[in-house]
Image (cartoon, rainbow, N blue to C red):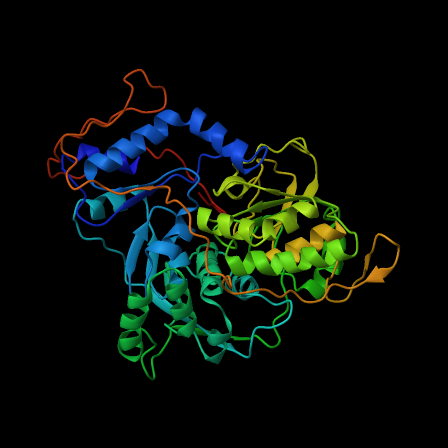
Amino acid sequence: MAILQFMSSGLPRVAVPSTVHCDHLIIAREGSHKDLFDATVTNKEVYDFLASASAKYGLGFWHPGSGIIHQIMLENYCFPGALIIGTDSHTPNGGGLGGLCIGVGGADAVDVMAGLSWELKCPKVIGVELTGKMSGWTSPKDVILKVADILTVKGGTGSIIEYFGPGVDSISCTGMATICNMGAEIGATTSVFPFNDRMVDFLQATGRKDIAQLASNYKTKLLSPDKNCVYDRVIHIDLDKLEPHVNGPYTPDLGHPISKLKEQALAAGWPMEISVGLIGSCTNSSYEDMSRAASIARQAINHGVKAKSKFTITPGSEQIHATIERDGLADVFREIGGLVLANACGPCIGQWARRDKKKGDRNTIVTSYNRNFTGRNDANPATHAFVASPEVVTALVLAGDLGFNPITDDLTAADGSKFKLHPPTGDTLPQSGFQSVKPLYQPPPADGSDLKVIVDPKSERLQVLEPFARWDGKDLLDMPILIKVKGKCTT
């Protein structure tokens, strides 16, 4: 819709660097290759339109299968001090690289693409002070799950969340991105971390050493909190004491420390058997996420144990997918019964052809996604969806039981013996570097004025917009209200 709106502006080319990403139309059914092939056939006219319009109007085009926009942005575009807007609420993912990355509506994006200024009401700033050090089963996901439990889904509205304190340095760059990503779930305008060496490591690993050096020159001047700055509110979290959390169901702000989850689940009468565990998505598909989850799966393999629940893995980008295939992590997941899906949003946004449950069947799923509102993942209002870190989700599918606490409880090996899982371990970045992949990317041509936008006049999915009549300067009055909603609402 944003591209159609820009076309109606009459402008020949976008005014600022802009890209298009095809991550929302790939339905999870059989696995990565088959699902991607099916999507390219089913959605050919949409992809052809987006590719041709991008070329004509000067936008970069990332082909289907290249990955989820937020992971691609982190790997290629985000940088410390950047101001980036994106037409998705999880655009703040880029705050993990010290950028102010803000999700907006399509009309706002079109204004920026057209060279107009972008405005918003000046936000408040909520500070989250992190002390202690991340270790053991605790992960960056648990930081934002705890913040959501404190602030609720409305508590960040009209605010930027700024993380600071000595605990920040124990969190990887992609871990910081996870935390910023889910700031959307508390209504925050965006979230951001101060520039540090963990960001330098990621920039260097993704071929941006020069940007890391430039940012280092401005670390204290521009990319760190001002001395004696005052926040509108401060939340304190001690990482030494932070437990792994599992939040849900039906809302991401209903927090449960892992030590209390079983008791609270039984008291509430939630289905205890886990039907499906799903890891990955834009929130938790970094190499670190995959390697830590794989370390749990390897322990199961060593004891002859497979997942008791269905198990899916969604890589965030082709770079991540190729790297976990090269390093054997994908095969580890497959060995315990996992299914690797396409590099796309998939079940996280409801693009999931789920077959194991009928609509109305009460069941429980656990994911490392960001949202778990009613029907969000599978359109079944009776599905109790919980969000947690990828390593906790992996542990839970090995037990198949929502009440399983991987810190204290035993699993049963194939020979009948009991064993406990060791805390997850993994590389923050791949030791052999990221696997080089053929870019699934179409750069904008220098001049697209002679190119045609492909839209079939008989299409039932696409229609070129006619420009609106010029505004006559008068306000629109007495317009009908089409819908009124209350409660927790999401796109």
Front position in the image: 95 or 262: 95
Quadrant in which the C terminus appears: top left
The answer to whether one can see residue 175 in this image is yes
Question: Measured from the top left, where is residue 455 in percent x and y?
Answer: 28, 23
Question: Measured from the top left, where is residue 91 in percent x and y?
Answer: 38, 53
Front position in the image: 118 or 46: 46
Position above or below: 203 against 11: below
Left or right side of 437 for 474: left
The answer to whether one can see residue 477 in this image is no
Question: Measured from the top left, where is residue 338 in percent x and y?
Answer: 65, 44
The image quarter containing residue 292 is: bottom right
Judged from this view, the residue extending furthest toward the right is 416
Position above or below: 47 against 370: above
Left or right side of 51 for 279: right
Position above or below: 253 against 204: above
Q: How many marks?
A: 0
Residue at the spot 60% in from the left edge and 77% down from the top edge: 240
Question: Measured from the top left, where is residue 283 in percent x and y?
Answer: 49, 54
Judged from this view, the residue extending furthest toward the top is 458
